[in-house]
Amino acid sequence: MCGIFGYVGRPVDAADMVLTALRRLEYRGYDSWGVCIGVNGHCEIAKSVGKIGDAVLDLPDSGIGFGHTRWATHGGVTRENAHPIRDASGRLAIIHNGIIENFRPLKASLLTAGYHFVSETDTEVAVHLVARYLGDGADAVHVRRATASAFSDLRGLNAIIILDQVTQTLTAVKKVSPLVIGRGPGGVFIASDALALAPHCSEVCYLEDGYIAQLSEAGVGLYRADTDAPVTPTWERLLIDHRAVELGGYPHFMLKEMSEQPEVIERISRDGIEQARQLAALIRESYGAFFLGCGTASYAALTGAYLFSRIARRHVNFVVGSEFMYQEHFLTNRSLVIALSQSGETADVIEPVLAAKQRGARIAALVNVRGSTLDRIADFSLYLNAGPEQCVLSTKAYTAKVANLLLTAHILNGSEHVGRDLLWRAVDGVRSVLTPNFSNAVLAVAERFKHQRSLFVVGRGLSYPTALEAALKIKEVSYIHAEGFAGGELKHGVIALIEEGTPCLVYSPLDETRADILSGAMEMKARGGFIVGISPEEDAVFDVHLPIPDVGDAAPLVMAPPAQMLGYQLALLRGYDPDKPRNLAKSVTVK
Ligand code: F6R
Protein backbone atom coordinates (compact mmCIF):
# COMPACT_ATOMS: atom_id res chain seq x y z
CA MET A 1 0.00 0.00 0.00
CA CYS A 2 1.09 3.60 -0.42
CA GLY A 3 2.69 4.67 -3.67
CA ILE A 4 6.21 6.05 -3.58
CA PHE A 5 8.16 7.88 -6.29
CA GLY A 6 11.42 9.83 -6.18
CA TYR A 7 13.78 11.55 -8.63
CA VAL A 8 17.30 12.99 -8.67
CA GLY A 9 18.79 14.51 -11.81
CA ARG A 10 19.06 17.76 -13.66
CA PRO A 11 16.70 20.57 -12.59
CA VAL A 12 13.24 20.08 -14.10
CA ASP A 13 9.67 20.61 -12.99
CA ALA A 14 10.27 17.81 -10.48
CA ALA A 15 7.04 18.49 -8.60
CA ASP A 16 4.99 17.92 -11.75
CA MET A 17 6.98 14.82 -12.65
CA VAL A 18 6.44 13.35 -9.19
CA LEU A 19 2.74 14.21 -9.23
CA THR A 20 2.29 12.57 -12.64
CA ALA A 21 4.04 9.43 -11.38
CA LEU A 22 1.89 9.42 -8.24
CA ARG A 23 -1.26 9.44 -10.37
CA ARG A 24 0.00 6.18 -11.86
CA LEU A 25 0.57 4.78 -8.37
CA GLU A 26 -2.68 5.97 -6.86
CA TYR A 27 -4.15 2.48 -6.98
CA ARG A 28 -1.83 1.73 -4.06
CA GLY A 29 -3.61 4.24 -1.85
CA TYR A 30 -5.64 7.39 -2.34
CA ASP A 31 -6.56 8.78 1.07
CA SER A 32 -4.13 11.67 0.68
CA TRP A 33 -0.94 12.60 -1.18
CA GLY A 34 2.09 14.81 -0.93
CA VAL A 35 5.14 15.97 -2.86
CA CYS A 36 8.44 17.41 -1.61
CA ILE A 37 11.18 19.06 -3.64
CA GLY A 38 14.49 20.47 -2.51
CA VAL A 39 14.78 24.20 -3.35
CA ASN A 40 17.24 26.82 -2.20
CA GLY A 41 18.38 24.82 0.78
CA HIS A 42 15.01 23.77 2.16
CA CYS A 43 12.33 21.13 1.63
CA GLU A 44 9.29 22.58 -0.11
CA ILE A 45 6.21 20.40 0.56
CA ALA A 46 2.72 20.38 -0.97
CA LYS A 47 0.12 17.92 0.35
CA SER A 48 -3.57 17.38 0.32
CA VAL A 49 -6.31 15.02 1.46
CA GLY A 50 -8.26 12.97 -1.11
CA LYS A 51 -7.43 11.79 -4.60
CA ILE A 52 -4.92 13.72 -6.73
CA GLY A 53 -7.48 14.43 -9.46
CA ASP A 54 -6.52 17.49 -11.48
CA ALA A 55 -4.22 19.02 -8.85
CA VAL A 56 -1.53 21.31 -10.27
CA LEU A 57 1.56 22.28 -8.27
CA ASP A 58 3.16 25.65 -8.59
CA LEU A 59 6.67 24.88 -7.33
CA PRO A 60 10.02 25.97 -8.81
CA ASP A 61 12.23 23.64 -10.85
CA SER A 62 14.41 21.29 -8.85
CA GLY A 63 16.87 18.44 -9.36
CA ILE A 64 15.44 16.42 -6.46
CA GLY A 65 11.95 15.48 -5.40
CA PHE A 66 9.79 12.69 -4.08
CA GLY A 67 6.15 12.00 -3.30
CA HIS A 68 3.68 9.61 -1.73
CA THR A 69 0.06 8.48 -2.04
CA ARG A 70 -1.21 7.30 1.32
CA TRP A 71 -3.40 4.46 2.52
CA ALA A 72 -3.82 5.40 6.17
CA THR A 73 -2.70 2.98 8.88
CA HIS A 74 -1.61 5.06 11.89
CA GLY A 75 -3.34 8.40 12.17
CA GLY A 76 -6.47 9.65 10.45
CA VAL A 77 -6.75 10.95 6.91
CA THR A 78 -5.55 14.50 7.47
CA ARG A 79 -3.13 16.86 5.74
CA GLU A 80 -0.75 16.67 8.73
CA ASN A 81 -0.61 12.88 8.50
CA ALA A 82 0.00 12.86 4.74
CA HIS A 83 3.59 12.21 3.67
CA PRO A 84 6.23 13.60 3.16
CA ILE A 85 6.87 14.56 6.78
CA ARG A 86 9.79 16.83 7.76
CA ASP A 87 12.17 16.60 10.70
CA ALA A 88 12.25 19.50 13.16
CA SER A 89 15.07 21.33 11.35
CA GLY A 90 13.43 21.07 7.93
CA ARG A 91 16.59 19.57 6.49
CA LEU A 92 15.13 16.07 6.04
CA ALA A 93 11.83 14.75 4.78
CA ILE A 94 10.55 11.16 4.79
CA ILE A 95 8.12 8.99 2.86
CA HIS A 96 7.27 5.56 4.20
CA ASN A 97 5.36 2.40 3.38
CA GLY A 98 4.60 -0.15 6.09
CA ILE A 99 3.83 -0.19 9.77
CA ILE A 100 6.46 0.58 12.41
CA GLU A 101 5.30 -1.98 14.94
CA ASN A 102 7.35 -0.54 17.83
CA PHE A 103 6.53 3.10 17.14
CA ARG A 104 4.99 3.67 20.59
CA PRO A 105 8.16 3.04 22.67
CA LEU A 106 10.26 4.84 20.05
CA LYS A 107 7.95 7.82 20.16
CA ALA A 108 7.96 7.86 23.96
CA SER A 109 11.75 7.98 24.04
CA LEU A 110 11.88 10.72 21.39
CA LEU A 111 9.30 12.78 23.31
CA THR A 112 11.38 12.41 26.46
CA ALA A 113 14.39 13.61 24.49
CA GLY A 114 12.46 16.74 23.53
CA TYR A 115 11.32 15.93 19.98
CA HIS A 116 8.07 17.57 18.97
CA PHE A 117 5.56 15.65 16.81
CA VAL A 118 3.29 17.34 14.29
CA SER A 119 1.43 14.22 13.05
CA GLU A 120 -0.19 11.10 14.54
CA THR A 121 1.76 8.81 12.23
CA ASP A 122 4.26 6.08 13.02
CA THR A 123 6.29 7.49 10.10
CA GLU A 124 7.28 10.65 11.94
CA VAL A 125 9.19 8.56 14.47
CA ALA A 126 11.55 7.42 11.71
CA VAL A 127 12.43 10.90 10.46
CA HIS A 128 13.19 12.11 13.99
CA LEU A 129 15.34 9.03 14.56
CA VAL A 130 17.34 9.72 11.40
CA ALA A 131 17.79 13.35 12.50
CA ARG A 132 18.94 12.20 15.95
CA TYR A 133 21.53 9.82 14.49
CA LEU A 134 22.59 12.40 11.92
CA GLY A 135 23.27 15.23 14.37
CA ASP A 136 25.49 17.73 12.56
CA GLY A 137 26.70 15.15 10.02
CA ALA A 138 27.13 17.09 6.84
CA ASP A 139 27.88 14.65 4.06
CA ALA A 140 26.06 11.86 2.25
CA VAL A 141 27.88 9.11 4.16
CA HIS A 142 26.53 10.52 7.44
CA VAL A 143 23.01 10.59 6.03
CA ARG A 144 23.32 7.01 4.86
CA ARG A 145 24.63 5.74 8.18
CA ALA A 146 22.03 7.67 10.14
CA THR A 147 19.27 6.22 7.95
CA ALA A 148 20.62 2.69 8.31
CA SER A 149 20.88 3.05 12.11
CA ALA A 150 17.38 4.48 12.41
CA PHE A 151 15.97 1.73 10.19
CA SER A 152 17.57 -0.98 12.29
CA ASP A 153 15.60 0.39 15.28
CA LEU A 154 12.28 -0.15 13.45
CA ARG A 155 10.26 -3.37 13.77
CA GLY A 156 7.93 -4.50 10.97
CA LEU A 157 7.90 -4.66 7.20
CA ASN A 158 8.83 -1.14 6.11
CA ALA A 159 10.34 0.89 3.30
CA ILE A 160 11.57 4.43 3.92
CA ILE A 161 13.15 7.12 1.77
CA ILE A 162 14.86 10.16 3.26
CA LEU A 163 15.30 13.32 1.20
CA ASP A 164 18.21 15.41 2.45
CA GLN A 165 18.32 18.83 0.89
CA VAL A 166 21.85 19.56 2.17
CA THR A 167 23.50 16.67 0.33
CA GLN A 168 20.77 16.59 -2.36
CA THR A 169 20.32 12.84 -1.89
CA LEU A 170 17.52 10.31 -1.57
CA THR A 171 18.47 7.48 0.79
CA ALA A 172 16.33 4.34 0.70
CA VAL A 173 16.19 1.19 2.79
CA LYS A 174 13.55 -1.52 3.16
CA LYS A 175 12.47 -4.78 4.69
CA VAL A 176 10.11 -6.87 2.49
CA SER A 177 8.08 -3.80 1.42
CA PRO A 178 9.23 -3.22 -2.18
CA LEU A 179 11.40 -0.46 -3.66
CA VAL A 180 12.67 -0.41 -7.23
CA ILE A 181 15.44 1.88 -8.45
CA GLY A 182 15.63 2.97 -12.07
CA ARG A 183 17.98 4.87 -14.33
CA GLY A 184 17.24 6.64 -17.56
CA PRO A 185 18.42 9.54 -19.66
CA GLY A 186 16.84 12.12 -17.32
CA GLY A 187 18.35 10.92 -14.05
CA VAL A 188 17.85 8.27 -11.37
CA PHE A 189 14.52 7.27 -9.90
CA ILE A 190 13.00 5.16 -7.16
CA ALA A 191 9.47 3.85 -6.75
CA SER A 192 7.35 1.34 -4.91
CA ASP A 193 6.34 -0.16 -8.24
CA ALA A 194 8.17 -0.57 -11.54
CA LEU A 195 5.03 0.64 -13.37
CA ALA A 196 5.77 4.19 -12.25
CA LEU A 197 9.31 3.98 -13.60
CA ALA A 198 8.26 2.80 -17.06
CA PRO A 199 8.02 6.25 -18.69
CA HIS A 200 11.47 7.28 -17.39
CA CYS A 201 13.74 4.25 -17.24
CA SER A 202 14.96 1.44 -19.40
CA GLU A 203 16.80 -0.36 -16.58
CA VAL A 204 15.86 -1.16 -13.02
CA CYS A 205 17.48 -2.62 -9.92
CA TYR A 206 15.31 -4.16 -7.18
CA LEU A 207 16.49 -3.04 -3.76
CA GLU A 208 17.01 -6.09 -1.56
CA ASP A 209 16.58 -6.34 2.21
CA GLY A 210 19.84 -5.64 4.03
CA TYR A 211 21.03 -3.03 1.53
CA ILE A 212 20.77 0.74 1.45
CA ALA A 213 20.66 2.84 -1.71
CA GLN A 214 21.62 6.45 -2.14
CA LEU A 215 20.50 8.39 -5.20
CA SER A 216 22.32 11.59 -6.13
CA GLU A 217 23.19 13.57 -9.23
CA ALA A 218 26.22 11.26 -9.56
CA GLY A 219 23.93 8.20 -9.91
CA VAL A 220 23.00 5.30 -7.65
CA GLY A 221 25.21 4.04 -4.83
CA LEU A 222 24.37 0.71 -3.23
CA TYR A 223 25.80 -0.39 0.15
CA ARG A 224 25.34 -3.07 2.76
CA ALA A 225 23.10 -1.56 5.42
CA ASP A 226 25.08 -3.09 8.32
CA THR A 227 28.68 -2.37 7.25
CA ASP A 228 28.24 0.40 4.66
CA ALA A 229 30.44 -1.63 2.29
CA PRO A 230 29.76 -0.63 -1.34
CA VAL A 231 28.05 -3.20 -3.59
CA THR A 232 27.66 -3.20 -7.38
CA PRO A 233 23.99 -2.86 -8.31
CA THR A 234 22.52 -5.48 -10.65
CA TRP A 235 20.60 -3.75 -13.43
CA GLU A 236 17.98 -5.47 -15.54
CA ARG A 237 15.93 -4.32 -18.48
CA LEU A 238 12.50 -2.97 -17.64
CA LEU A 239 10.03 -4.85 -19.80
CA ILE A 240 6.86 -2.82 -19.16
CA ASP A 241 5.42 -0.99 -22.12
CA HIS A 242 4.03 2.14 -20.48
CA ARG A 243 1.29 2.38 -23.15
CA ALA A 244 -0.24 -0.78 -21.64
CA VAL A 245 -1.15 1.25 -18.58
CA GLU A 246 -3.28 3.81 -20.43
CA LEU A 247 -7.09 3.67 -20.54
CA GLY A 248 -7.07 3.28 -24.32
CA GLY A 249 -10.53 4.73 -24.90
CA TYR A 250 -12.30 2.92 -22.04
CA PRO A 251 -14.02 5.05 -19.39
CA HIS A 252 -12.53 2.97 -16.56
CA PHE A 253 -9.72 0.48 -16.01
CA MET A 254 -12.26 -1.96 -14.57
CA LEU A 255 -14.14 -2.14 -17.88
CA LYS A 256 -10.90 -2.27 -19.86
CA GLU A 257 -9.50 -5.11 -17.79
CA MET A 258 -12.77 -7.09 -17.83
CA SER A 259 -12.79 -6.74 -21.62
CA GLU A 260 -9.25 -8.12 -21.87
CA GLN A 261 -10.23 -11.46 -20.31
CA PRO A 262 -10.77 -13.39 -23.56
CA GLU A 263 -7.29 -12.46 -24.83
CA VAL A 264 -5.78 -13.34 -21.45
CA ILE A 265 -7.26 -16.87 -21.62
CA GLU A 266 -6.27 -17.18 -25.26
CA ARG A 267 -2.66 -16.28 -24.38
CA ILE A 268 -2.59 -18.93 -21.65
CA SER A 269 -3.93 -21.63 -23.96
CA ARG A 270 -1.26 -20.68 -26.52
CA ASP A 271 1.82 -19.71 -24.49
CA GLY A 272 1.13 -21.05 -21.02
CA ILE A 273 1.57 -24.78 -21.56
CA GLU A 274 5.22 -25.07 -20.59
CA GLN A 275 4.75 -23.13 -17.36
CA ALA A 276 1.72 -25.25 -16.45
CA ARG A 277 3.71 -28.42 -17.12
CA GLN A 278 6.42 -27.23 -14.75
CA LEU A 279 3.89 -26.47 -12.04
CA ALA A 280 2.28 -29.89 -12.56
CA ALA A 281 5.70 -31.55 -12.17
CA LEU A 282 6.31 -29.72 -8.88
CA ILE A 283 2.91 -30.79 -7.56
CA ARG A 284 3.56 -34.39 -8.62
CA GLU A 285 6.90 -34.44 -6.75
CA SER A 286 5.51 -32.84 -3.58
CA TYR A 287 4.20 -34.57 -0.53
CA GLY A 288 1.49 -32.19 0.63
CA ALA A 289 0.68 -29.12 -1.47
CA PHE A 290 -1.02 -25.98 -0.19
CA PHE A 291 -2.72 -23.18 -2.09
CA LEU A 292 -2.64 -19.80 -0.47
CA GLY A 293 -3.85 -16.34 -1.42
CA CYS A 294 -5.93 -13.43 -0.17
CA GLY A 295 -9.23 -11.96 -1.33
CA THR A 296 -9.90 -12.67 -4.97
CA ALA A 297 -6.67 -14.67 -5.24
CA SER A 298 -7.96 -16.92 -2.43
CA TYR A 299 -11.14 -17.61 -4.39
CA ALA A 300 -9.06 -18.47 -7.46
CA ALA A 301 -7.07 -20.81 -5.20
CA LEU A 302 -10.23 -22.41 -3.82
CA THR A 303 -11.46 -22.91 -7.38
CA GLY A 304 -8.11 -24.59 -8.04
CA ALA A 305 -8.64 -26.95 -5.10
CA TYR A 306 -12.01 -28.00 -6.59
CA LEU A 307 -10.51 -28.39 -10.10
CA PHE A 308 -7.58 -30.48 -8.85
CA SER A 309 -9.84 -32.77 -6.89
CA ARG A 310 -12.33 -33.12 -9.72
CA ILE A 311 -9.99 -33.39 -12.71
CA ALA A 312 -6.62 -34.56 -11.34
CA ARG A 313 -8.03 -36.52 -8.35
CA ARG A 314 -5.43 -34.77 -6.25
CA HIS A 315 -6.02 -33.08 -2.93
CA VAL A 316 -4.38 -29.68 -2.64
CA ASN A 317 -5.04 -27.94 0.67
CA PHE A 318 -6.38 -24.43 0.61
CA VAL A 319 -5.58 -21.81 3.24
CA VAL A 320 -6.30 -18.08 3.28
CA GLY A 321 -2.98 -16.18 3.42
CA SER A 322 -3.57 -14.47 6.77
CA GLU A 323 -4.56 -17.81 8.40
CA PHE A 324 -1.66 -19.79 7.05
CA MET A 325 0.67 -19.03 9.97
CA TYR A 326 -1.70 -20.94 12.26
CA GLN A 327 -1.40 -24.10 10.16
CA GLU A 328 2.23 -24.05 9.15
CA HIS A 329 3.18 -26.91 11.50
CA PHE A 330 2.04 -29.26 8.72
CA LEU A 331 4.91 -28.13 6.52
CA THR A 332 7.97 -30.24 5.83
CA ASN A 333 10.80 -29.98 3.33
CA ARG A 334 8.67 -32.05 0.92
CA SER A 335 5.72 -29.64 1.05
CA LEU A 336 4.88 -27.34 -1.81
CA VAL A 337 3.27 -23.96 -1.15
CA ILE A 338 1.52 -22.54 -4.19
CA ALA A 339 1.02 -18.82 -3.56
CA LEU A 340 -1.36 -16.89 -5.79
CA SER A 341 -0.99 -13.12 -6.02
CA GLN A 342 -1.55 -10.59 -8.77
CA SER A 343 0.78 -8.00 -7.24
CA GLY A 344 3.23 -10.40 -5.62
CA GLU A 345 3.40 -7.92 -2.73
CA THR A 346 0.49 -8.90 -0.45
CA ALA A 347 1.94 -8.96 3.09
CA ASP A 348 -0.46 -11.72 4.18
CA VAL A 349 0.99 -13.88 1.40
CA ILE A 350 4.65 -12.88 1.69
CA GLU A 351 4.89 -13.50 5.41
CA PRO A 352 3.63 -17.12 5.34
CA VAL A 353 5.67 -17.83 2.22
CA LEU A 354 8.83 -16.68 3.99
CA ALA A 355 7.92 -18.81 7.02
CA ALA A 356 7.25 -21.84 4.79
CA LYS A 357 10.56 -21.34 3.04
CA GLN A 358 12.35 -21.32 6.38
CA ARG A 359 10.80 -24.72 7.11
CA GLY A 360 12.28 -26.04 3.89
CA ALA A 361 9.06 -26.08 1.84
CA ARG A 362 9.28 -25.29 -1.87
CA ILE A 363 7.47 -22.23 -3.11
CA ALA A 364 5.61 -21.94 -6.40
CA ALA A 365 4.02 -18.61 -7.29
CA LEU A 366 1.20 -17.74 -9.66
CA VAL A 367 2.03 -14.07 -10.02
CA ASN A 368 1.33 -11.26 -12.45
CA VAL A 369 4.00 -8.70 -11.56
CA ARG A 370 7.46 -9.84 -12.58
CA GLY A 371 10.21 -8.79 -10.21
CA SER A 372 7.73 -8.49 -7.32
CA THR A 373 8.70 -9.71 -3.86
CA LEU A 374 6.84 -13.03 -4.28
CA ASP A 375 8.40 -13.59 -7.69
CA ARG A 376 11.86 -13.13 -6.22
CA ILE A 377 11.22 -15.35 -3.20
CA ALA A 378 9.60 -18.21 -5.13
CA ASP A 379 11.53 -21.28 -6.33
CA PHE A 380 9.30 -21.30 -9.40
CA SER A 381 7.07 -18.55 -10.81
CA LEU A 382 4.23 -19.18 -13.21
CA TYR A 383 3.62 -15.76 -14.76
CA LEU A 384 -0.01 -14.87 -15.32
CA ASN A 385 0.91 -12.63 -18.27
CA ALA A 386 -2.39 -10.79 -17.82
CA GLY A 387 -0.76 -7.38 -18.44
CA PRO A 388 -0.82 -4.56 -15.86
CA GLU A 389 -3.96 -4.62 -13.71
CA GLN A 390 -4.71 -1.10 -12.52
CA CYS A 391 -8.28 -1.14 -11.29
CA VAL A 392 -8.16 -1.83 -7.57
CA LEU A 393 -10.58 -4.70 -8.17
CA SER A 394 -8.99 -7.80 -9.59
CA THR A 395 -10.73 -9.17 -12.68
CA LYS A 396 -8.42 -10.40 -15.44
CA ALA A 397 -5.77 -11.63 -12.99
CA TYR A 398 -8.44 -13.81 -11.32
CA THR A 399 -9.37 -15.26 -14.69
CA ALA A 400 -5.71 -15.87 -15.52
CA LYS A 401 -5.17 -17.76 -12.25
CA VAL A 402 -8.22 -19.96 -12.76
CA ALA A 403 -7.33 -20.64 -16.42
CA ASN A 404 -3.79 -21.69 -15.45
CA LEU A 405 -5.06 -23.97 -12.70
CA LEU A 406 -7.58 -25.61 -15.05
CA LEU A 407 -4.80 -26.32 -17.52
CA THR A 408 -2.45 -27.60 -14.80
CA ALA A 409 -5.14 -29.93 -13.41
CA HIS A 410 -5.58 -31.44 -16.88
CA ILE A 411 -1.82 -31.82 -17.34
CA LEU A 412 -1.66 -33.67 -14.01
CA ASN A 413 -4.46 -35.89 -15.22
CA GLY A 414 -2.65 -36.62 -18.51
CA SER A 415 -5.35 -34.81 -20.51
CA GLU A 416 -3.54 -31.63 -21.56
CA HIS A 417 -5.43 -31.41 -24.87
CA VAL A 418 -8.78 -31.43 -23.02
CA GLY A 419 -7.54 -28.55 -20.86
CA ARG A 420 -6.53 -26.56 -23.93
CA ASP A 421 -9.87 -27.24 -25.64
CA LEU A 422 -11.72 -26.08 -22.55
CA LEU A 423 -9.72 -22.86 -22.56
CA TRP A 424 -10.61 -22.27 -26.19
CA ARG A 425 -14.28 -22.80 -25.37
CA ALA A 426 -13.90 -20.38 -22.49
CA VAL A 427 -12.41 -17.70 -24.79
CA ASP A 428 -15.61 -17.71 -26.88
CA GLY A 429 -17.72 -18.13 -23.76
CA VAL A 430 -16.27 -15.06 -22.04
CA ARG A 431 -16.63 -13.05 -25.28
CA SER A 432 -20.32 -13.92 -25.32
CA VAL A 433 -20.86 -12.50 -21.82
CA LEU A 434 -19.05 -9.29 -22.69
CA THR A 435 -21.32 -8.33 -25.59
CA PRO A 436 -23.47 -5.16 -25.45
CA ASN A 437 -26.62 -7.36 -25.34
CA PHE A 438 -25.41 -9.22 -22.29
CA SER A 439 -24.25 -5.97 -20.62
CA ASN A 440 -27.70 -4.48 -21.18
CA ALA A 441 -29.33 -7.49 -19.55
CA VAL A 442 -27.00 -7.04 -16.57
CA LEU A 443 -27.74 -3.30 -16.52
CA ALA A 444 -31.46 -4.07 -16.18
CA VAL A 445 -30.65 -6.25 -13.14
CA ALA A 446 -28.46 -3.48 -11.71
CA GLU A 447 -31.28 -0.94 -12.15
CA ARG A 448 -33.55 -3.22 -10.16
CA PHE A 449 -31.01 -3.79 -7.35
CA LYS A 450 -29.39 -0.36 -7.09
CA HIS A 451 -31.24 0.67 -3.92
CA GLN A 452 -30.99 -2.70 -2.16
CA ARG A 453 -29.01 -3.01 1.05
CA SER A 454 -28.20 -6.72 0.80
CA LEU A 455 -27.71 -9.35 -1.88
CA PHE A 456 -26.94 -13.08 -1.78
CA VAL A 457 -25.04 -15.27 -4.19
CA VAL A 458 -25.20 -19.07 -4.11
CA GLY A 459 -23.24 -21.78 -5.85
CA ARG A 460 -22.40 -25.41 -5.19
CA GLY A 461 -19.32 -27.45 -6.06
CA LEU A 462 -17.20 -25.66 -8.62
CA SER A 463 -19.52 -22.63 -8.52
CA TYR A 464 -19.19 -22.16 -4.76
CA PRO A 465 -15.87 -20.27 -4.96
CA THR A 466 -17.32 -18.30 -7.88
CA ALA A 467 -20.22 -17.27 -5.61
CA LEU A 468 -17.71 -16.01 -3.03
CA GLU A 469 -15.79 -14.10 -5.69
CA ALA A 470 -19.00 -12.65 -7.18
CA ALA A 471 -20.11 -11.39 -3.77
CA LEU A 472 -16.70 -9.82 -3.10
CA LYS A 473 -16.69 -8.08 -6.48
CA ILE A 474 -20.18 -6.65 -5.96
CA LYS A 475 -19.67 -5.50 -2.38
CA GLU A 476 -16.27 -3.88 -2.81
CA VAL A 477 -17.29 -1.69 -5.73
CA SER A 478 -21.00 -0.97 -5.06
CA TYR A 479 -20.90 -1.01 -1.22
CA ILE A 480 -24.05 -3.16 -1.19
CA HIS A 481 -23.68 -5.90 1.38
CA ALA A 482 -23.23 -9.05 -0.70
CA GLU A 483 -22.70 -12.51 0.71
CA GLY A 484 -21.71 -15.63 -1.15
CA PHE A 485 -22.37 -19.05 0.27
CA ALA A 486 -22.59 -22.71 -0.59
CA GLY A 487 -26.09 -23.61 -1.72
CA GLY A 488 -26.29 -26.43 0.84
CA GLU A 489 -25.72 -23.98 3.69
CA LEU A 490 -28.89 -22.07 2.91
CA LYS A 491 -31.07 -23.85 5.42
CA HIS A 492 -28.37 -23.75 8.08
CA GLY A 493 -28.98 -20.09 8.79
CA VAL A 494 -28.78 -17.78 5.80
CA ILE A 495 -32.36 -18.35 4.71
CA ALA A 496 -33.46 -16.38 7.76
CA LEU A 497 -32.36 -13.25 5.90
CA ILE A 498 -34.41 -13.81 2.76
CA GLU A 499 -37.50 -11.62 2.60
CA GLU A 500 -39.77 -10.11 -0.04
CA GLY A 501 -37.63 -8.86 -2.95
CA THR A 502 -34.21 -9.93 -1.56
CA PRO A 503 -31.85 -10.19 -4.55
CA CYS A 504 -30.47 -13.72 -4.95
CA LEU A 505 -27.95 -14.61 -7.66
CA VAL A 506 -27.95 -18.32 -8.36
CA TYR A 507 -25.13 -20.04 -10.26
CA SER A 508 -26.45 -23.09 -12.00
CA PRO A 509 -24.05 -24.63 -14.52
CA LEU A 510 -25.10 -27.89 -16.21
CA ASP A 511 -23.22 -30.14 -13.82
CA GLU A 512 -24.11 -32.49 -10.97
CA THR A 513 -25.06 -29.55 -8.73
CA ARG A 514 -27.98 -28.36 -10.87
CA ALA A 515 -30.89 -30.19 -9.25
CA ASP A 516 -29.82 -29.24 -5.72
CA ILE A 517 -29.03 -25.64 -6.53
CA LEU A 518 -32.41 -25.17 -8.24
CA SER A 519 -34.23 -26.65 -5.29
CA GLY A 520 -32.37 -24.20 -3.01
CA ALA A 521 -33.47 -21.41 -5.37
CA MET A 522 -37.07 -22.58 -4.95
CA GLU A 523 -36.71 -22.32 -1.19
CA MET A 524 -35.40 -18.75 -1.48
CA LYS A 525 -38.16 -17.84 -3.90
CA ALA A 526 -40.79 -19.31 -1.58
CA ARG A 527 -39.64 -16.74 1.01
CA GLY A 528 -39.84 -13.82 -1.40
CA GLY A 529 -36.31 -13.92 -2.91
CA PHE A 530 -35.91 -12.39 -6.39
CA ILE A 531 -33.92 -15.01 -8.30
CA VAL A 532 -31.41 -14.12 -10.99
CA GLY A 533 -30.22 -17.38 -12.58
CA ILE A 534 -26.75 -17.37 -14.16
CA SER A 535 -26.96 -20.55 -16.14
CA PRO A 536 -26.75 -22.04 -19.64
CA GLU A 537 -30.42 -23.08 -19.36
CA GLU A 538 -33.57 -21.26 -18.39
CA ASP A 539 -35.61 -22.55 -15.44
CA ALA A 540 -39.04 -21.63 -14.11
CA VAL A 541 -37.58 -20.59 -10.76
CA PHE A 542 -35.58 -17.75 -12.32
CA ASP A 543 -37.19 -14.31 -12.24
CA VAL A 544 -34.40 -13.17 -14.57
CA HIS A 545 -32.19 -15.49 -16.59
CA LEU A 546 -28.65 -14.38 -17.57
CA PRO A 547 -27.67 -16.99 -20.16
CA ILE A 548 -24.06 -18.16 -20.13
CA PRO A 549 -22.62 -20.79 -22.46
CA ASP A 550 -22.04 -24.35 -21.27
CA VAL A 551 -18.25 -24.78 -21.14
CA GLY A 552 -17.97 -27.81 -18.86
CA ASP A 553 -15.27 -27.52 -16.19
CA ALA A 554 -14.25 -24.11 -17.56
CA ALA A 555 -17.53 -22.81 -16.08
CA PRO A 556 -15.80 -20.61 -13.41
CA LEU A 557 -14.23 -18.61 -16.26
CA VAL A 558 -17.59 -17.65 -17.77
CA MET A 559 -19.45 -17.34 -14.47
CA ALA A 560 -17.26 -14.58 -12.99
CA PRO A 561 -17.65 -11.85 -15.67
CA PRO A 562 -21.44 -11.39 -15.24
CA ALA A 563 -20.86 -10.59 -11.55
CA GLN A 564 -17.96 -8.29 -12.42
CA MET A 565 -20.26 -6.48 -14.85
CA LEU A 566 -23.06 -6.30 -12.27
CA GLY A 567 -20.67 -4.78 -9.72
CA TYR A 568 -19.42 -2.29 -12.29
CA GLN A 569 -22.93 -1.21 -13.34
CA LEU A 570 -24.09 -0.93 -9.73
CA ALA A 571 -21.10 1.28 -8.90
CA LEU A 572 -21.89 3.61 -11.79
CA LEU A 573 -25.61 3.75 -10.99
CA ARG A 574 -24.84 4.53 -7.35
CA GLY A 575 -22.33 7.22 -8.33
CA TYR A 576 -19.08 5.54 -7.25
CA ASP A 577 -15.66 5.36 -8.92
CA PRO A 578 -15.25 1.69 -9.93
CA ASP A 579 -11.47 1.99 -10.21
CA LYS A 580 -10.86 3.31 -6.70
CA PRO A 581 -13.39 2.04 -4.18
CA ARG A 582 -13.28 3.59 -0.73
CA ASN A 583 -10.89 2.19 1.89
CA LEU A 584 -9.18 -0.17 -0.56
CA ALA A 585 -5.77 -0.31 -2.19
CA LYS A 586 -4.42 -2.52 -4.91
CA SER A 587 -1.29 -3.81 -3.20
CA VAL A 588 -1.95 -4.69 0.40
CA THR A 589 1.59 -4.52 1.71
CA VAL A 590 0.68 -4.16 5.39
CA LYS A 591 -0.78 -6.83 7.66
C1 F6R B 1 -10.46 -7.94 -4.95
C2 F6R B 1 -9.05 -7.70 -4.82
C3 F6R B 1 -8.34 -8.18 -3.59
C4 F6R B 1 -7.03 -8.86 -3.99
C5 F6R B 1 -6.23 -9.23 -2.75
C6 F6R B 1 -4.96 -9.99 -3.09
O1 F6R B 1 -10.96 -7.47 -6.15
O2 F6R B 1 -8.45 -7.12 -5.67
O3 F6R B 1 -9.14 -9.03 -2.84
O4 F6R B 1 -7.34 -9.98 -4.75
O5 F6R B 1 -5.88 -8.07 -2.04
O6 F6R B 1 -4.15 -9.26 -3.96
P1 F6R B 1 -2.97 -9.95 -4.77
O7 F6R B 1 -3.57 -10.86 -5.78
O8 F6R B 1 -2.20 -8.82 -5.37
O9 F6R B 1 -2.17 -10.71 -3.74
Image: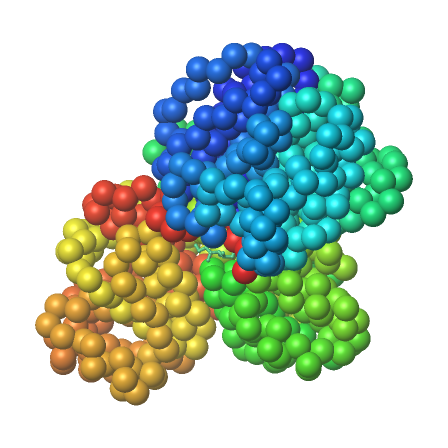
The answer to which quarter of the image holds residue 407 is bottom right
Looking at the image, which is closer to me, 220 or 156?
A: 156
Q: Position of residue 25 (x, y in %)?
A: 51, 36
Q: Is residue 264 left or right of residue 277?
A: left
Q: Is residue 500 left or right of residue 227?
A: left
Q: Residue at x 41, y 63 (%)?
A: 469
Q: Residue at x 63, y 57 (%)?
A: 156
Q: Residue at x 28, y 53 (%)?
A: 478
Q: Position of residue 582 (x, y in %)?
A: 35, 48
**Would residue 385 be seen by someone viewing this image from the given angle?**
no
**Would residue 457 be seen by someone viewing this image from the given angle?**
yes
Number of numbered callouts drawn: 0
Q: Is residue 113 left or right of residue 23?
A: right
Residue 577, placed above or below residue 175: above
Q: Position of residue 466 (x, y in %)?
A: 41, 66
Looking at the image, which is closer to me, 381 or 43?
A: 43
Q: Residue at x 37, y 24 (%)?
A: 54
Q: Position of residue 35 (x, y in %)?
A: 51, 28
Q: Is residue 423 left or right of residue 166?
A: left
